[in-house]
Image (cartoon, grey):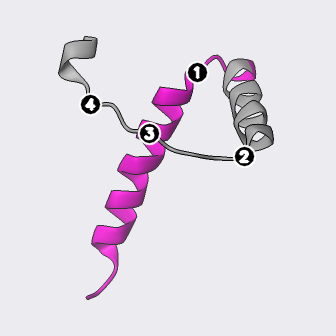
Amino acid sequence: MSKKDMAEIRVFVPPELRQKFKGKCVTQGKTMSDVVAAFMEKYIKEDDKEPA
């Protein structure tokens, strides 16, 4: 997907959390964007399974 097909979001977290997250992503060979997007998809799918 190209950048023009993507939407930007801004998230504010403590600098230490960002650094730890970035480090973990790097060691796993993933981008922070890919990990956050995967989390969002999982979160939506899990929420859809919960009874209303």
Q: Quadrant of the N terminus?
A: top left
> Badge 3: few (under 14), some or many (20 or more) residues near its Cα, within 10 Å?
few
- Viewer-nearest of discs 4 and 3: 3
Q: Quadrant of the C terminus?
A: bottom left
- Given contact means CB atoms under 8 Å apart, are the residues at marks 4 and 1 in contact? no
Identify the main secondary structure in magenta: helix
Residue 32 among those drawn in magenta: yes
Marks 3 and 1, how far apart at CA: 19 Å
**Which is nearer the N-term, disc 4 or disc 2?**
4
Name the residue rendered at 42%, 58% in the picture: 43
Q: Nearer the viewer, residue 43 or 15?
A: 15
The amino acid at mark 2 is Pro
Residue 30 tag number: 1
For label 3, the residue is: 10
Name the residue rendered at 33%, 59% in the picture: 44
The amino acid at mark 1 is Lys
For label 2, the residue is: 14
